[in-house]
Image: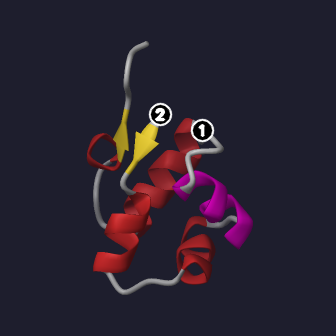
Amino acid sequence: MKNRIREFRVKRGMTQEALAAAAGVRRETIVFLEQGKYNPSLQLAYNVAKALGTTIDKLFIFEEK
């Protein structure tokens, strides 16, 4: 699953640390999400989207294989 977390985070002027704090996770989790190495739970996806002022469907791109 691809995502636009870094794009939205940079647009809002947030650091990975700030986004992690707002979403209630560690910075490493944000790093892994941005790199596409981790698929979040629905709750985490919601928390990240809310912290970035957007919706899950705008933030995450599901690609069928």
The residue lying at 43 percent from left, 40 percent from top is 2
- Which badge, 2 or 1, is on the more N-terminal residue? 2
Compared with 53, 4 (above or below) is: above
State whether residue 26 appears in this view.
no
Helix, strand or loop status at disc 1: loop
In the picture of the structure, the residue carrying the numbered disc 2 is: 1
Quarter the C terminus occupies: top left
Q: Is residue 34 left or right of residue 64?
A: right
On the image, the x and y values in percent for residue 7 come to: 34, 66
Question: In the depicted view, which residue is nearer to us: 35 or 29?
Answer: 35
Q: Quadrant of residue 52?
A: bottom left
**Magenta stretch in the rendered image:** 26-34
Mainly helix, strand or loop, the magenta region? helix
The residue lying at 65 percent from left, 55 percent from top is 32
In the picture of the structure, the residue carrying the numbered disc 1 is: 39
Look at label 2 and name its amino acid: Met
Q: Label 1 near label 2: C-beta < 8 Å?
A: yes
Q: Quadrant of residue 51?
A: bottom left
